[in-house]
Amino acid sequence: MTELVLARAQMAMLFAFHIVFAVAGMGMPVLMVAAEWAHLRTGRPVYLDLAKRWARGTAVLFAVGAVSGTVLSFELGLLWPRFMEFAGGVIGLPFALEGFAFFAEAIFLGIYIYGWDRVGPTLHLLSGALVAAGGILSGVFVVTANAWMNSPAGFVPVQGMPSGVSPLAAMLNPAWKTEVLHMTLAAFAASGFAVAGIHAFKLLRDRENPFHRRALAIALAVGGTAAVLQPVSGDFSARFAARNQPAKLAAMEGQFRTERGAPLRIGGIPDAAAGRTRFAIEIPKALSLLAFHDPDAEVAGLSSFPPDERPDPLPVHLAFQVMVACGSAMALVALTAGWLAARNRDALFRRPFLAAAAACGPLGLLAVEAGWTVTEMGRQPWAIHKVMRTSEAVTTAGGLALPFLFFTVLYAVLGVSAAWHLRREIAASPAGGGPTDPGEG
Amino acid sequence: MPDAPTLLSGAMLVSLIFYALLGGADFGGGVWDLLSRGRRAVDHRRLVASAIGPVWETNHIWVIVAVVVLFTAFPRAFAVVSTALFVPVTLLLAGVVLRGAAFAFHAYRLHDDAEPGRWGAVFAAASLVSPVLLGATIGAMSSGRVRTESLVFTGDTSAWLAPFPVAVGLLTLALFSYVAATYLTLETPDPGLQDDFRARAMWSAAATAFLCVLVPVLARSGAPGFYEALTGSEWSVPLVVLTGTSALGASMALRLRVYTLARACAALQSALVIAGWGLAQYPYLVRPNLTIYDTAASPSMLRLMLYALAVGAVFLFPSVFALFRIFKRDVLSGRHARRP
């Protein structure tokens, strides 16, 4: 049992770390390509400077993402050999495709970062676009594999092993579309808002700086669009869970009793022992309405599932609340930005909005971590929904405390160093009064 | 036409050869960074960093291709390897993480100061340790000491701590350092630096040759099944002759300072060493009793993997080619090294 907890803790830590860099790998290339495209269109050097600086940040984030992703591809086998034995032959295809997408990303990132003076402008922009495409596709394929764990398809279990395998059906499992859409939008929103937050923070002290103004505008356009679309995608995901993973939905919403016209709970602390969620603000019938688009629809409660098939509602509900709160705040800021930009662009660079944008900087990444907690903790006790329990998937190798400790320390050092390098890069950004020499730094 | 498991294991072998020739040289570069001493140490480090810079992320991915094919096409073998060789694989991962991240931090710092810094040291040290662990893991898979019953791993996890796997680990290190030094002679027009790496290439060539003899000798008792296949097959003699000839060719070319020829011979020699390992290991993935046939995934998955690899190759080989053409054109043709 303790080994299982240690394996789960280590996996959670590795993912919590990697997902930040994975998200940056999906979102950052889009920003850097947008800046380069603006440069080619307008000829203004400030955009070229911006593209180069964002590209350097992308390279550091990509490097850390690449190695932490490599660790995960091995750790799946090291910590969950039974899972990989079962799943590798069913859901391996998207991993293979992810390998290729990642390959393309690495090749064209090399050309992009080191090739400013070696390839023509169009080819350079195209390389950037391929980096972005590779990054997005990598994410899409990996999320497809995770979607399969939520809605396994493409095989029949026979004596504990898959049979009649159809890898395409496994890859195109029922959950893939909703999950991929949600994660891709989340990656754009999180990267866009994190970058916007940094530039907004800089602008608070240096209001007229044209470099940071342009950067803020691009980052908000990318992140804001995604943040406004995300609630729609969230609705798809919640309705998918309602139909296919009712126990997960019940845990997300802190719904213990099965009832018609179930209320939506905002906040609150689920108390599994008492079988109710305390201190929540309840909006009558809203959960039934949201989950099934019918105010009187029946929502299954946790108590309708066998005790050993229930996820723990406490972390799932709390993480869900955090995710929704962050997402709502970002959508609100994005809508405000759109409204301000439409009326008077200068209003974007006044103090109140800049402060709000700076405050929203970390929210996207926080929402990603929370959302990932919801989907993983909400799937428990299953590693593969209704097919394999997490406790059946874990390794028989003992002594997992040591690698857990080791990787935690290692990643702490890596995270701090990556942050330090990025901070240095940001500190070297041009001061007000116009772009400086783009080669510096 | 070979069957699907053979084709897929062949694809893994090809990925590993590319990894050794490209990624391996990046590891070797780190080794030479670590061992650089004296007046020109800073120049050595700069040369290594500039040679690796644009291509190392791409070079790293060959091993990911091999691992993904392993866990997709042969999931049981992956499960056994990750359980039985938990320790070296975990340590190897730590090395990969440290080296990759350290290089990124180190390379971006090199622009503003010549001090290697702490990350430079981490990059170099991880480059030294990781190849040994990689080789020891592969050696353990060949040793016949990873025992399984009805495809489930049983027994102890110390198979990699024996003379044979450790020797394979050292051979991997020597080989990576050797190809790196040989390539580096062509990365600089400075004759002093060329001579430094020529000397390093000759030393590591000798170490590689010695280990290429020692490994089969140790295999006799340390990996008997592997030894039998390595020495008793119809391809054994031609392989040894070819490998020996390319090794001699590389040494002669280094002596005569014909660096393009030395590089070609060293690369061929390395490819042959790895191909020889693959041939002797075939059809086993983990000796003594896990073959590519009894660990293979369903035929439909194998077929799709082959399609995916074919489509991926059509797209990726030209892209990799473009990458190397953009950054290494002069290096590849040898023109860079002749520039005044």
Image: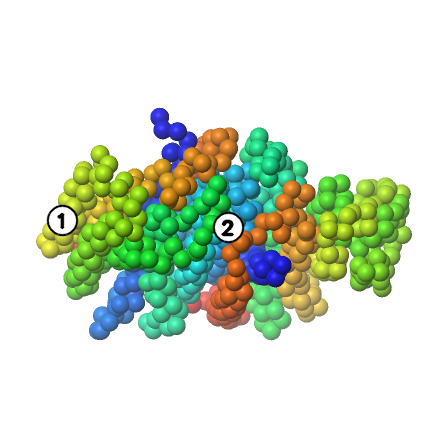
Q: Chain of mark 2?
A: A
Q: Nearer the viewer, mark 1 or mark 2?
A: 2
Evaluate whether residue A152 shows in this view. yes
Indicate the position of residue A278 as horizontal and vertical percent values.
84, 62
| SS at badge 1 | helix
The residue lying toward the viewer, choosing from B80 and B9, is B80
Indicate the position of residue B114 as horizontal and vertical percent values.
32, 71
> Which residue in the protein does label 2 denote?
A77
Furthest residue in direction top, as rendered: B1
Indicate the position of residue A51 as horizontal and vertical percent values.
48, 57
> Which image quarter: residue A268?
bottom right
The residue lying toward the viewer, choosing from A283 and A82, is A82
> Which residue is depicted at the point 27% across and 50% down?
B221
Q: Is residue A387 left or right of residue A416?
A: right
Specify the amino acid type for callout 2.
Gly
Evaluate whether residue A286 shows in this view. no
How far apart are the two marked residues, 1 and 2, measured between alpha carbons? 41 Å
Quadrant the C terminus of chain A occupies:
bottom left
Q: Is residue B339 left or right of residue A213?
A: left
Specify the amino acid type for callout 1.
Leu
Q: Is residue A96 above or below residue A407?
A: above
> Which residue is depicted at the point 47% across and 50% down?
B154
Q: Residues within 10 Å of mark 2 (few under 14, many from 20)?
A: many
Quadrant the N terminus of chain A occupies:
bottom right
Q: Is residue A257 left or right of residue B14?
A: right
Q: Are marks 1 and 2 on the same chain?
A: no
Q: Chain of mark 1?
A: B
Q: Is residue B290 left or right of residue A256?
A: left
> Which residue in the protein does label 1 denote?
B248
> Which residue is depicted at the point 89% across and 52% down?
A284
> Which residue is depicted at the point 40% across and 57% down?
B158
